[in-house]
Amino acid sequence: MATKMTGNNVPSGEDKVTKLKVTMVAWDRYDTTVITAVNNFLLKVWNSITGQLLHTLSGHDDEVFVLEAHPFDQRIILSAGHDGNIFIWDLDRGTKIRNYFNMIEGQGHGAVFDCKFSPDGNHFACTDSHGHLLLFGFGCSKYYEKIPDQMFFHTDYRPLIRDANNYVLDEQTQQAPHLMPPPFLVDVDGNPHPTKFQRLVPGRENCKDEQLIPQLGYVANGMLFPKLNVK
C-alpha cells in the first residue's frame, strides 16, 4: 500500500501505529483492473497486468467489505461498508458517480454487509446490519410500497441440532433444513401475513388459499408459531 526505498526494512513510525490491511478485493467485468479496499477506508484501482496504481478513491468513513463489479460495464463498480455508505464508481475516470447513505430513522446508520447487481445491471440489492433489504434501480417503487415493512420467514430463528451422524436438523421438525417445506412469511412477532403475500415465497406461488394459511401452535413461552403440516 505504500512505496518504500529498496533495502529499507526498518518499519516507519506510521507503520508501527497503523498496519494497513486489505479488507476486500474485486476485479472489473473483464479483469483489466483490480480494486482493493484498505482498512484506512480508501479504495485503490490497479492495472491487473502491470500492477500500476491507477486511482485512489476516497469517500468511505469506515472499513469496506463489499466490492461488486457491474455485470457487463467494466467501468462501473459498487462499494459499501460499515459506515452505511454505498458508492457507485467510474473506474476509468477514478470518480464517484452516485452515493447512497443508509440512514435508519431513530437508529443512526446501518452498516451495509452485502450488495449484488441484477443480471441486467439496472438494479442492485443490499443487506444491512439491521436486517433490512435495500433495493435500488430504475422505475417506480409503488409495488414495493405495498409490501409489509416486517417480513421474516417463520423458521428464521428456529434452533438447529445435530443427529448421530452430525448432520444438521431443524429441532422442531427433525428434518434437514433444505428438505423442509417452503416457510411462511410472518411479522416480527410471528404473526402470519395474508395469503397474497405468502405467494411471494418460492414454492408457494401456485398454492390454493387454504394451503397458504398456517395452522398455529403454541410453545412454552406462549408465542405463536406456524405448524408445517400444510404441504
Image (cartoon, grey):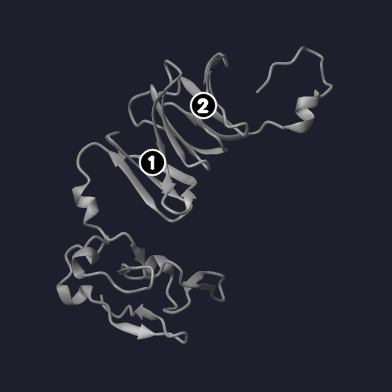
Residue 116 bears which disc, if any?
A: 1
Give the answer, above or below, for where 153 lies relative to 68: below
Q: Which type of secondary structure does the marked residue at label 1 adopt? A: strand
Question: Is residue 166 placed above or below 29 in the rendered structure?
Answer: below
Image quadrant containing the C terminus? bottom left
Question: Percent x, y for residue 38?
Answer: 60, 31
Check disc 1 and give the amino acid type: Lys
Name the residue furthest front.
Answer: 106
Q: Is residue 13 left or right of residue 22?
A: right
Rendered image quadrant of residue 103: top left
Compared across the picture, whether 45 is left or right of 74 comes to right
Determine the residue positioned at 19% across, 51% down: 143
Residue 208 makes an appearance in the image: yes
Q: Is residue 204 visible?
A: no
Q: Earlier in the sequence, mark 2 or mark 1?
A: 2
What number is the disc on residue 189?
none
For the residue carrying disc 1, how many other residues have a C-alpha within 10 Å: few (<14), some (14-19), or many (20+)?
some
- Quadrant of the rendering where the N terminus is positioned: top right
| Category of crowding for the residue at label 2, using alpha-carbon neighbours closer than 10 angstroms: few (below 14), some (14–19), many (at least 20) | many
Q: Secondary structure at mark 2?
A: strand
On screen, residue 57 above or below 216? above
Residue indicated by mark 2: 35
Instruction: Report the amino acid beneath label 2.
Output: Ile
Residue placed farthest to the right in the image? 10
In the displayed structure, 94 sits above or below 67; it is above
